[in-house]
Image (cartoon, rainbow, N blue to C red):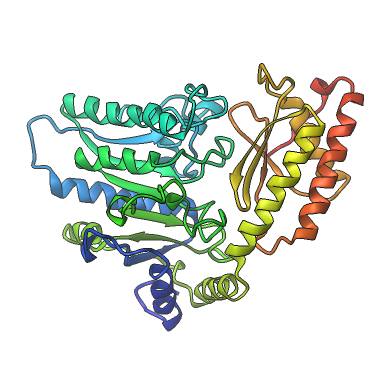
Amino acid sequence: TNSRYLHPNASLLSQKLANLFPSSSRGDADSLTKVFFVNSGSFALRLARAYNKKQQNTLHVQKDKQPKQCIISIDHAYHGHTLATLDVSPYKHHQGTEITECPAYVKRVPYPDMYRGVHSNCKDETEATEQYSAYVEDACQEITLNGDTVSAFLMEGGMSVAGVILPPKSYISRCVRAVRDAGGLYIADEVQTGFGRLGKCTWAFEYSNDDSEDDDEKVLPDIVTVGKPFGNGMPIAAVITTPKVASAFESLGVEYFNTFAASPVCCAAGLSMLHVLSKYELQKNALEVGSLLMKLFSEVKARHGWIGDIRGSGFFLGIELVRNQHTLEPATEETSFVCSVLKEKYRVLTSIDGFHENVVVVKPPMVFTKEDAVEFVTCFEKCLIDLPAIDKLHQLGKTPT
């Protein structure tokens, strides 16, 4: 099972995975063609950070003052539970007790929430992109002026833990342009959102591309991490990067191998997942059934005052519950109640995310049908109808997520 002993399954899976990414307009050296297998999304992010660090070490000469290699991370992001990934996961800095603040080398910027974020009053996506991307541009400038280096911009194309936040049009491309101009790389965390979950696109980093942009303007990461759905439950994940980044790592004489990550069994699971994804057109299914879910939830919102916002794409949706649609007071206890009743009474599993823990996250299996969607939303509405009759919600136990 050691990755140093290549099995045909590992080679074939590497090729099929790399083929899912578009070619870079900047040339083969910047195309995502190098694949490294790991066991989990957390370790994929850890390895991505290692590759990024080695790349930066080859770009900067030794100085009397060793500059910090700074990473720009989005507030309330979550990238894993290893020590290296916890450092760049502001969600854990807010919610946890082990790491209560960002390390000095991590520059945190506001997440691009158009509903209740710091710029929720923007008139359209264009204005929101200008407002939110300016924080990344300013962070790059501040890092450089301090004599430090911009190492990377790390972002989930769809932010689940933050409450299902999809960035406005061209936000990622504008941020990445500033980061690359400062000498940094773009790391795309696709652990939760990859493999067509958004319906519209294979990878979430593609979602905010403006359809009117030329191919040269459309963003392509330097490093991508994939995990959770890759083996459909089997422990396999991967880092996909460019020849340029891989060569920088290799030039330092550092060898990467993994005892279990290239297991022929896990690679067979990955191959089967990709086969089923393609054969049964599950990305198309996510788009069509996800659109139906959005429509059904919009109808429920019109009948009940509990739903403040419905957002997302495909099978990556967030239903934000509020006590008042004008003040946006979070319905935190009510959301916990709904999630619990869906599980206990209707045998429907959902989860809760968002800064105020008031967003029901809808991430069903990719084989979810239109009939499943109707049944789910019907059960969800029954929970909302029951809410006004529930006393002392604040005394109920919190739903774990």
User: Is residue 173 something one can see in this rendering?
Assistant: yes
Marks counted in the figure total: 0
Quadrant for the C terminus, please: top right
Quadrant of res 369: bottom right
Quadrant of res 400: top right
Residue at 51% across / 45% down in the picture? 158
List the single residue furthest toward the top: 327
Task: Please tell me whether residue 259 is drawn above or below residue 157 in the rendered image.
Answer: below
Residue at 18% across / 61% down in the picture? 253
Q: For this rendering, which residue is in front, 343 or 29?
A: 29
Residue 27, x across and y down, in percent: 21, 63
Task: Please tell me whether residue 277 is drawn above or below residue 315 in the rendered image.
Answer: below
Residue at 17% across / 57% down in the picture? 252
Residue at 56% across / 66% down in the picture? 231
Residue 127, x across and y down, in percent: 42, 29
Residue 361, x across and y down, in percent: 66, 42
Judge left or right: residue 32 versus residue 315: left
Task: Please tell me whether residue 210 is drawn above or below residue 89 in the rendered image.
Answer: below
Judge left or right: residue 398 versus residue 96: right
Quadrant for the N terminus, please: bottom left
User: Is residue 2 something one can see in this rendering?
Assistant: no
Task: Please tell me whether residue 149 is drawn above or below residue 217 in the rendered image.
Answer: above
List the single residue furthest toward the front: 212
List the single residue furthest toward the right: 389
Residue 339, x across and y down, in percent: 77, 39
Quadrant of res 177: top left
